[in-house]
Each structure stands twice: as structure tokens, then as C-alpha cells.
Image (spheres, rainbow, N blue to C red):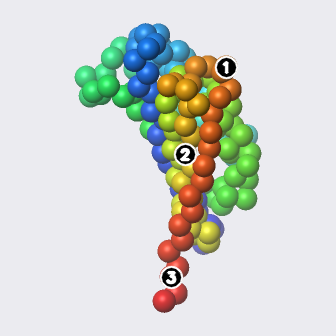
Amino acid sequence: MDQESIVYGCIKDAAPCLNDATRRRSNREVMLQLPKADDWPFLCQEMFAIPRPEASLGSYQTEVMHFGASYKAVEYEWEQWIAKFEDLLSKLYWVSATVHLETELSGTHTFTWESESDAHVPGSGAMRVRCEWSHDSPFS
């Protein structure tokens, strides 16, 4: 059986200083520009819950754009996947983003991006990333 990797997470946007409709519409347009199919490693529209243009009745204050996908050993191409994800983040309005990478051989990694200010504005380039790693060993 091939090594399976699961990637999932969410991008959160809750910046009260900016117009909600403008942020939501802009984020939606950026995500709709993602390819339907992409070169390896995949980062495409189908893995995202793309925000609706109008305010969601299911959201309180935070717009949550969640995503997930199953890959064949994406950890070997992880730097490329992260570069594509950070390129996407650079074009979006957001406050924080979290990516979980679950691998069969090297455990679970959690990557978190936070805006340097109240919210990331497209093109500002100011973001911090940190990684946490945990590994559940099948051996006692």
C-alpha cells in the first residue's frame, strides 16, 4: 500500500476594520482563480470550501475557509506545497491559517500562520509561520 498523507485546515478572516463584503468577495475571487487541476503537489479549487459572496447565516463573526485533501506521500514535496499555500495566503484577507499534515511515517505536523498586524491584507507580505510536530508511535 502506498503512503497516504492527509492535509487539512482552515483560513480564518475576522478583521472588523475592513468591509466584510469586500473581503469576502475578494477572497472568493482569489479562490475561484485556483486551477481545477494543478501540477504536483496539488493545490486546487476542489479542496477548498469557497466563501459565498454574501454573509453566511452559519457564521458568527469569523469567516472560515476550510480545506482538505488526500495525497500520495506529499511530505516529500512539502516545501513546494507550502510555497503554493503561502502564495495563496499572500492574495487573501485573513487573520490566521492552520494546516495539518498527517503522515504515516513521520507523524502529524501543524503549521500556523498569523498576521503581523490585526489582519493580513493582500500584497502586504507580513506573516509569521510556526510548526508543531507530534508523533504517535505504533511501538510501545
Q: Between disc 3 and disc 1, whose residue precedes?
A: 1
Above or below: residue 37 compared with residue 119? below
Q: Pointer 3: what residue?
A: 138
Q: Pointer 1: what residue?
A: 123
Name the secondary structure under disc 3. Answer: loop
Q: Residue at x 45, y 33 (%)?
A: 12
Q: Residue at x 64, y 58 (%)?
A: 72
The image shows residue 112 at horizontal and vertical percentages of 55, 45
Q: Name the foreground residue: 2 vs 17.
A: 17
Answer whether residue 67 is visible to the viewer in this image.
no
Name the secondary structure under disc 2. Answer: strand
Residue pushed farthest front? 117
Q: Residue at x 70, y 52 (%)?
A: 78
| Amino acid type of the residue that numbered disc 2 sits on in the rendered structure | Thr
Q: Residues within 10 Å of mark 1 (few under 14, many from 20)?
A: few
Number of numbered discs overlaid on the protein picture: 3
Q: Pointer 2: what residue?
A: 112
Name the secondary structure under disc 1. Answer: loop
